[in-house]
């Protein structure tokens, strides 16, 4: 097995182990067992320590997530449609890749390089674009980005804890809430 393939095998086993046992209970021993490795030394050979492995788990899940979400984002001609597609893609990723999402939620507080600022910046930019296009009402885009991402993260965190959570219902309510928060209220004429 090539070094790259072995690293991928270890990261895959780490994702599954963290998703099943949680970050705190995950050890190299459990990861090695899940990966079918003869010893934890093979993990240590490829990763300097738990932090490097956690960072790689985070990066791998984000790569998969980005690939998945990009398939949803080019389908709309409006900014509101892009925002809607982004939120739908997040919940659909949870359905399709539950262990990846659970692992992401578990390791996110422990990664040494966080993408939160980048998530926030992109969301705020999207919201500003919608305001410039006249699709969204006036609001502070940075503050609204905090709210939208917190709502998304809240659903994902709850879904990670509760496999029985109705993600279809969550999707409908999340979309309704964000739409009402961002768009102009239509006043009846006359």
Image (cartoon, rainbow, N blue to C red):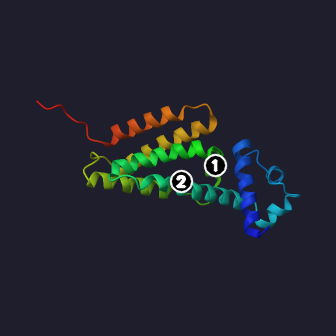
Q: Is residue 48 above or below residue 22?
A: below
**Residue 48 seen in the figure:** no
Q: Is residue 139 left or right of residue 36?
A: left
Relative image position of residue 67 (x, y in whole percent): 54, 57
* Viewer-proximal residue among 59 and 35: 35
Task: Please identify the quadrant where the N terminus is shown.
Answer: bottom right
Relative image position of residue 98 (x, y in whole percent): 62, 44
Q: Quadrant of residue 2?
A: bottom right
Relative image position of residue 97 (x, y in whole percent): 61, 47
Q: What whole-number distance in Å separates the C-alpha atoms at marks 1 and 2?
A: 12 Å
**Residue extending furthest toward the right:** 38
Q: Is residue 13 left or right of residue 155?
A: right
Mark positioned earlier in the residue sequence (1 or 2): 2
Task: Please identify the quadrant where the C terminus is shown.
Answer: top left
**Residue 167 seen in the figure:** yes
The residue that mark 2 highlights is: 68
Residue at position x 74%, y 65% from top?
5
Q: Secondary structure at mark 2?
A: helix
Q: Residues within 10 Å of mark 1 (few under 14, many from 20)?
A: many
Q: Residues within 10 Å of mark 2 (few under 14, many from 20)?
A: some
* Viewer-proximal residue among 117 and 180: 180
Q: Quadrant of residue 42?
A: bottom right
* Viewer-proximal residue among 173 and 111: 173
Q: Secondary structure at mark 1?
A: helix
Tally the marks: 2
Q: Is residue 184 left or right of residue 151?
A: left
Residue at position x 58%, y 36% from top?
158
Residue at position x 81%, y 49% from top?
30
Q: Is residue 74 left or right of residue 63?
A: left
Residue at position x 43%, y 48% from top?
85
The residue that mark 1 highlights is: 100
């Amino acid at each position: 097995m090539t070094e790259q393939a072995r690293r991928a095998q270890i990261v895959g086993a780490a994702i599954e182990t963290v998703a099943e046992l949680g970050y705190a209970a995950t050890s190299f021993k459990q990861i090695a067992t899940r990966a079918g490795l003869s010893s934890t030394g093979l993990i240590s050979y490829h990763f300097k320590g738990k932090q490097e492995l956690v960072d790689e788990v985070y990066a791998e899940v984000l790569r998969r997530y980005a690939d998945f979400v990009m398939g949803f984002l080019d389908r709309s001609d409006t900014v509101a449609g892009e925002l809607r597609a982004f939120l739908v893609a997040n919940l659909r990723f949870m359905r399709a890749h539950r262990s990846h999402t659970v692992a992401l939620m578990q390791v996110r507080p422990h990664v040494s390089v966080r993408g939160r600022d980048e998530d926030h910046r992109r969301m705020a930019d999207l919201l500003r674009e919608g305001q410039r296009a006249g699709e969204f009402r006036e609001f502070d885009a940075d503050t609204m980005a905090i709210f939208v991402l917190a709502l998304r993260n809240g659903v994902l965190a709850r879904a990670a804890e509760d496999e029985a959570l109705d993600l279809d219902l969550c999707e409908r309510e999340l979309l309704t809430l964000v739409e009402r928060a961002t768009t102009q209220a239509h006043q009846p004429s006359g």
